[in-house]
Structure formats: C-alpha cells, structure tokens
Amino acid sequence: MLTNTLIELLKIEYPLVQAPMAGGVTTSKLVAEVSNAGGLGMIGAGYLNPHQAREQIRETKQLTANPFGINLFVPEEFDVMDGEVNSANQALKPIRHQLNLPPKEGFEFPDAANVQEAFADHIQVVIEEKVPICSFTFGIPSEDVIADLKRHDVFLIGIATTVEEAIENEKAGMDAVVVQGSEAGGHRGSFMDGNQEKLIGLMSLIPQVVDEVSIPVIAAGGIMDGRGLMASICLGANGVQMGTAFMTCQESGAHETHKAAILNAHEDQTVLTRAFSGKWARGIENRFISEMKRHERFLPDFPVQNVLTKDIRKGSAGQKTPEFMSLWSGQSPRLAKRQTAKELIQTVMEDVKRISSNF
Amino acid sequence: MLTNTLIELLKIEYPLVQAPMAGGVTTSKLVAEVSNAGGLGMIGAGYLNPHQAREQIRETKQLTANPFGINLFVPEEFDVMDGEVNSANQALKPIRHQLNLPPKEGFEFPDAANVQEAFADHIQVVIEEKVPICSFTFGIPSEDVIADLKRHDVFLIGIATTVEEAIENEKAGMDAVVVQGSEAGGHRGSFMDGNQEKLIGLMSLIPQVVDEVSIPVIAAGGIMDGRGLMASICLGANGVQMGTAFMTCQESGAHETHKAAILNAHEDQTVLTRAFSGKWARGIENRFISEMKRHERFLPDFPVQNVLTKDIRKGSAGQKTPEFMSLWSGQSPRLAKRQTAKELIQTVMEDVKRISSNF
C-alpha cells in the first residue's frame, strides 16, 4: 500500500523523511541510522559552511550505503540597519544580564555577497559529492542553480506552507514538495510575503495542495507515529517528514536540556516567536519568548536577529537552563520518546501495518 | 471498517456529524437531510430561545425518523461595563457609517439571570421532546444538568480544543467529545483560560487526545471529504464533525453572500478574530476584520460584543456586501461545493471506500 512514486524516486523503503533540522541536530550518525532503517536521512546544512557540509557528507557516507539527502537555506536579501541592531541589543540586555553574559554592541556578520557565494559553493559540494537528494528551505533557488543540479541528477525537494507556494515549487521544477502545516516545530519555511504567519493545519493544507499540484507531496508538522503517516497518506500525501520525533532520538545532536524540555511538554505549550531568529518559528514557550514578546515585531529580520541571539542561546544551553534556549518543537510533544532512530522507524511502520489491517 | 462505538451509540450509519452551526444555518431541512442520508444532523440552537428550539425540533421530526441532535451554548458569566460598551460603539461608528446604519449608543441585553434561566428551559425542552443527542459549546454544564439529561438517556457530547479540556469532558461524564482543531471555522469552543488562542492542528490534537481519554472522539476542523474522514480515523478519532462543507449545501440557511464567499476563498484567506462576537472565531478576512484589528483586544467579551455588532452583520447581509458580515469558514474553503447534503455525504462515503481499498 505504501509503494508510491516518492519511494521509487528516492530509492528508499518507507515514505519517511527525517527533517533536516539545522544547528547540530542531524548528526551523521542520526542521518545514517535513518537511511539504514529504510527512511531518508537528511543533513540540515543551513548553518554549516561548505567545508563542514562536505565533511559531514563524507562522514555519513562511511556510515550508510543507502541514499541520504541534504538541506540548504536559500539565501534572502537582508539589510543590517544600525538603529534596528541597537534596539535589538537594548531589548536583549536584561536577558544577557540574567545569564551573566557580557553586554554586546553592534553586529558582526559576513556580508550578503558572501552568503550568496557560500550558497553557490554548497551547491558545488552537493554535485561533487554526488548527494542524490537536495531540499531547500526559505525559498526556491534560481533557475541556473536548479538546472545545474538537475543536470547532475540531483532530486530536488522544495517547501511550501500554502497552496500557492506549492504551485510555485512545481513551476520551478522541484521534483517533490514538503508541505509544512501549522503544527510544525522550528522555522516556518514560507517564502512568499506574509505567509510565515498564515498557519494552515495539515488537515486542511494537504488535500488542498494535492488537488493543485502533480509532484509528490511530503507532509510535515506534528507527525510523530504511524497514525500521522497513515493520516497524511489518506489526505493525499506520498510521505511524511518528521522532525520533533527524531529530535529526542538517541542519535540526535540536540542538547540534552532541549530533549528533556520536549519530553516534558504538552501540546498547548508551544508558541510561534520571531524573537530568536527574526523569522517565525515554533518552540516551547520559555522566559526568553515571553520577555521578548513586546519587542518581537520590531526586531531585525533573519538572519540578523539570529546572529544577535547566538551568545544567549549558547550561554543558556551551557548553563543547562532551558529558559533562554530556542526549544523548537512541533505541536505533538506528548508523543515524543527516548529511543533510537531505528526503533522509531520500526514502530511507525508497525503502527502503519496495524492501522492498514483495520480497513 | 467504520463500524465503531460511536456509530453504535448514536444509532447512525456513518460516523459523520453535521456541525451545529448557530445563527440560522442549520435549517430543519438540512438537519433532517443529513440524518436521512445516514449522518447525524444537529440543530445549532445557540441563538434560539427555548420556544424556537422546540418548534425546530418538532419540525425536524416531521422530516426524519432518524436520530438527530441539538447543540446548546453553555452560558458564561459576563459583565456589561459602560466604558467598554461605549468604546466598542465608538470603534464601530465608522463601520455603521459606511453601511448607512443609524449610530448606536449603550446596550440592550437580557440580564445574566435570564441567560441561565433560558439554558435551564432549553434543557427541559431537550428532555420533553426526547432529543436523543445533545452537544455543548463553550463549556461543560453543571453536574445537576448532566445528571438530569443522563436520567433521560440523552447522549452528551462535549467540546475540547486541548487535551486538558478533553479530559475535563470525560471526567464530567460526557459520552463523547468533539475535538476542535485550529483549522475549524466559526467560534473556538474552548472553555479553559487562554485556550481560545491555543491553536492546535488536528494532526497533533487527535492522537494526543485519544491517548488520554477513553470516550469516543469526534474530530472537527477543516474536514470536507472522505480524505479528512479517513485521516481522522487513522489518527484515532471515531468520527468527524463537518461545518463549512455543509454551510455551502443547498439546504443550509447560510446567506447566499456567505456561501459565495466560501466558494471563492482560498486556504490562506481565513483569520481568527474576536471583533464580531468577543470570542475568537475563524472567518474569511474582510474589511470589518481588518478595520477592527487594532481594537480587537479591547472589545467586550462574548456575548456583549456579539449583541453590539448584530445590526452591522445584518445590515451588511441585507446590502449583500460580504465586507462586514461574519463569513465563518474553516481552512479548507477550496474543497467546498454547491451540492445537496445527501450528495455531500454520499461522496464522502464513496471517497472512504476508494481510500480504504488502497490498503
């Protein structure tokens, strides 16, 4: 029953993709274990430089002979405005104080040209290392990049949070699209104006997308087990992408404090915030989110705010307090477990078998 | 496959409940047609007085021999504060002006005692007319009311928007619970503090609820066809409640302008607002919602604001302009169709059969 185009195209056993969570979560071990267990492991390379990405690709190849993929952030135009940076540092001051961190002024960041250059280098790494699957967040790459990757037979996966974004992905030549529901943890992958705040639940989003595109659809957001996978298939998706469920796995590189926070959280404790990065993202509510709430809409855009809060997130993790960390989580933390990636995938597929047998 | 406790308990053919949309949508014809076609028709009696409710129950009985139900709003404490009412009327002034409606001052409303009395009378009507199923919105009735209804073998259905609310419903003795996802159109049924704004998608909400309660769960929010019904069952629900899908049906009493707005809307055009009624509700964004946005958090609570905007909603509908009407809709308007209730139910069940056969 779960044999479909997506499985055939990706050359995997199960229609189950491990979400490419950036920031050290997707260790080579996690990615490889997922692919070894029949799913699709994904390297979240959003915060890696091209050299680090190449290293991790090579390391992962040592651990699995099965296909795995990589995810890149599509760079966006951004401005660094002194006034905005100063206000943000001002708003962050009491938080740095609570963490005993030194005060900070100004901003150091590679200029926009470098970000574009780094993206071009990343694409070359993907091609040179023959990574078979490449997915994108925060946008659709340029025609040239798409053509280049396609010439080298890389399977391309885009992201959409609305029907219109899904259509744009198909038009641009993406081979499949991840459809991210409002339930999803971490950053909204939206790339069209105002869409970060258009929070469409998967029950609505999947069927409306599949009615309008013909490329395979991968559902993402709140899916943690075989029930979610089966539901997504019924709604018309070809497979699922699971993030939070892999976050608490043994092989995940998430900080222990972050894992513990998810394992203790309820479904009504996550909120959307742009205070950590300048982009809307879903995480478990903590002191940072509530104290920054009134500043939230005036903070600099991604990636500026993300760079500004780096010392705070790192300092909070170092002090093992969850209160100022970005505790990304989808809306189903009650379903999270401590287990290996292999156990998770096996349980999902057993659930699927059990549910299917009822029909 | 779809034979389950809920169907047996409700004595219906399909696990498909028509949402009890208040305000004239659930005509006797709609309710009866749904029950005749094997679903459960529901009278939305939230804005009816006990006499009107009795009349509609009797009329519906003439049109169907199958079971149908009724929904009541559980009355909440509310205050009418002059200052708040005056500010709200002030904020509504430019809107009344655009609609050429006479300016309004003050407020006329039955006092709180009457609301409680009317609720008690409604319960007696349900018992006297032997309505077999009664569901509740905005709360759980008192122990006495529950005991009284149970003594008369009325099947009781509560509403929940979080796991905790579902648990409270089970504890109070409800026989089943509607689990309302963030996708749902119309009013949030939440009754615990702050929950109206905790928007949990069905993909997350259903499995987390069914893991914690043992009464049957009915999923509501964005479900429009057999795909949504099958998905809900896979997630662990026993059935679904569909609102928007019935709203555009031929037998629905919704204003033609409202039906047309849904049929032309996209998934990203609905928003949550409390400007119409003082309670958060999802509808298609229009001029009323955007012009009232900045006042939204300072308006009186339900039902005060609802009474204050009555002339505006009515005036807008009378002038056939959708811009100041409450165009309630879930997040799946692209899936709405003009059809009869019977056609809708038949298509849903054909979809279900087709999807089941794939497993």
Image (spheres, coloured by chain):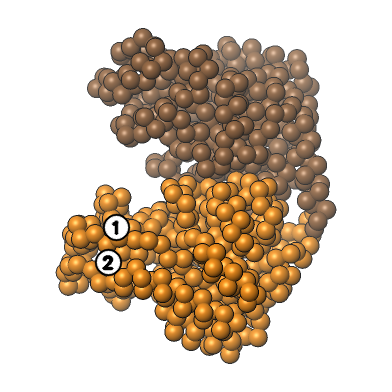
Chain colours: A brown, B orange
**On residue B308, which mark appears?**
2
Whether residue A102 appears in this view of the structure is yes
Secondary structure of residue under mark 2: helix
Which is nearer the N-term, disc 1 or disc 2? Answer: 1
Residue type indicated by callout 2: Leu
Mark 1 vs mark 2, CA separation in Å: 9 Å
| Residue drawn at point x = 31 percent, y = 31 percent | A295
A112 above or below A17? above
Exactly how many numbered labels are in the figure? Answer: 2
Counting from the top left corner in percent of width and height, residue B42 is at 56, 74
For residue A343, side relative to residue B302 (left or right)? right
Residue type indicated by callout 1: Pro
**Image quadrant in which the C terminus of chain A is located:** bottom right
Say which of A78 and A260 sits in front.
A260
| Residue drawn at point x = 62 percent, y = 71 percent | B150
**On residue A251, which mark appears?**
none
Q: Are marks 1 and 2 in contact (CB under 8 Å)?
A: yes
| Residue drawn at point x = 47 percent, y = 61 percent | B138
Counting from the top left corner in percent of width and height, residue B8 is at 74, 70
Residue under circle 1?
Answer: B300
Counting from the top left corner in percent of width and height, residue B350 is at 71, 68
